[in-house]
Amino acid sequence: MTRSTRISAAQARRIAVAASGLDGAVPGERGRVGPRTLERAIGRLGLLQLDSVNVFERSHYLPLLARLGPYDRPALDRLLHHDHGRSLGAYTEYAAHEAAVIPVADWPLWAWKRREPMRGSTDAWAAEHATLIDDVRAEFAERGPMRPSEMEHPAHERLPGGWWNKSDAYWATAILFRRGELVTVGRSRFERRYAVADAVLPEAARAELGAVDAHRTLVGRAAIALGIATVDDLADYHRLPIADTKVAIAALVDAGALEPVEVEGWGRPAYRSVGARSPRAVRSTALLSPFDPLVWHRPRAERLFGFAYRISIYTPAAQREHGYYVLPVLVDDHLVGRVDLKSDRKAGVLRVQHAHVEPAHAERAGELAERVAPSLREAAAWQGLERVEVAGAGTWAREVAAAV
């Protein structure tokens, strides 16, 4: 039996950072960003996770900022049809991790998921409201692409209350989207605009790819994007079942696309994508979205970087340790701290409401703050803000305030 290659923890970190496209992400040293550069970056990651929180910037913009530097956000909006959303372009959306932007060409990869039963009581609700779902489908077929808020169905009454207090017609659109009968053709004011899939999908995207082939493709892509990963890591990238992921891994190992490895301190089987770069050093400084692929699987972030991280937007204010919208900070091959950012657009200020340096890096707090300051100034300018202000507390606040 062939022994697995042994890899140090430091080497694993460098492989992961390089595979994620963050190797060489240094403020002031990146070139011009045009649509093709944006497309290549999205292709490398495979998807962009979506989230509605806009206190600093919506999450799907941030992985590209971290890797490419300042770019024209309207250019990305045009690429994703988030500027008007009335026709299908090269991208659509699906639950490809959580809600995420994916290429239209990848639509066949998710046929297996569209056929699966839905979570909890959703299938029972759908059966109970089958007539309503048929009516909503028919309205989209008759009227063409539109937002759920534009529906005229009587069941789309406007209800008082919060975000989740939606009408039955709204939930019918969600079920039709999950089944793949409606597709997202873009967004307007960040609200999805749907169209009937058969009316807008190109013929190639309507192909039905089998689950085994789809899982193998998705696991292979996850392996390339992660560089080095465990079974759980590879399954999480596209939220695949563990059993199906293991089958795909075995096939990819047999095909020579994945190499079994042993990583120092991981204590579990791991796999390296054949062809993944293993640089001797990486140079990088980046502010990471809470939904960046490098950190979105929290167990992997802790295993790779010793970085215990939980996003705080769902945590009651009194229980938040590091703030509300907390971004991990990457310097070279370490996650050295975290900052809570808010774009105060009226005042023209990027507010650092909390700054924390990880205890393992506290002795270098001043040096690291100097490394991070250009990223904060770059992010402020990209947001159209005039300056950065450190307005809050934290173990890193004094050093970051001095550096910016």
Image (spheres, rainbow, N blue to C red):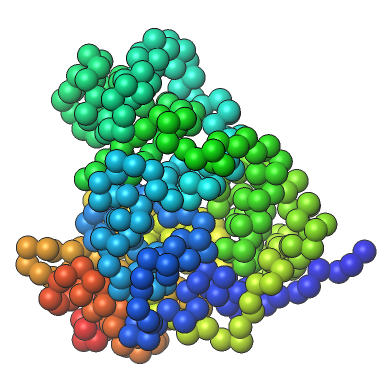
Q: Is residue 33 above or below residue 259?
A: below
Answer with left or right where residue 120 lies relative to residue 251: left
Answer with left or right where residue 22 lies relative to residue 400: right
Q: Residue at x 55, y 60 (%)?
A: 300
The part of the image, by quadrant, that contains residue 111 is: top right
Between residue 270 and residue 362, name the one nearer to us.
270
The part of the image, by quadrant, that contains residue 402 is: bottom left
Between residue 224 and residue 376, name the one nearer to us.
224
Answer with left or right where residue 2 lies relative to residue 51: right
Q: Residue at x 42, y 44 (%)?
A: 93
Q: Is residue 30 above or below residue 71?
A: below
Between residue 275 and residue 124, name the one nearer to us.
275
Q: Is residue 226 above or below residue 194?
A: below
Answer with left or right where residue 139 lies relative to residue 209: left
Between residue 382 and residue 327, name the one nearer to us.
382
Q: Residue at x 29, y 41 (%)?
A: 86
Q: Residue furthest right?
A: 1
Image quarter in which the C terminus is found: bottom left
Residue 155 on image: x %, y %: 25, 15
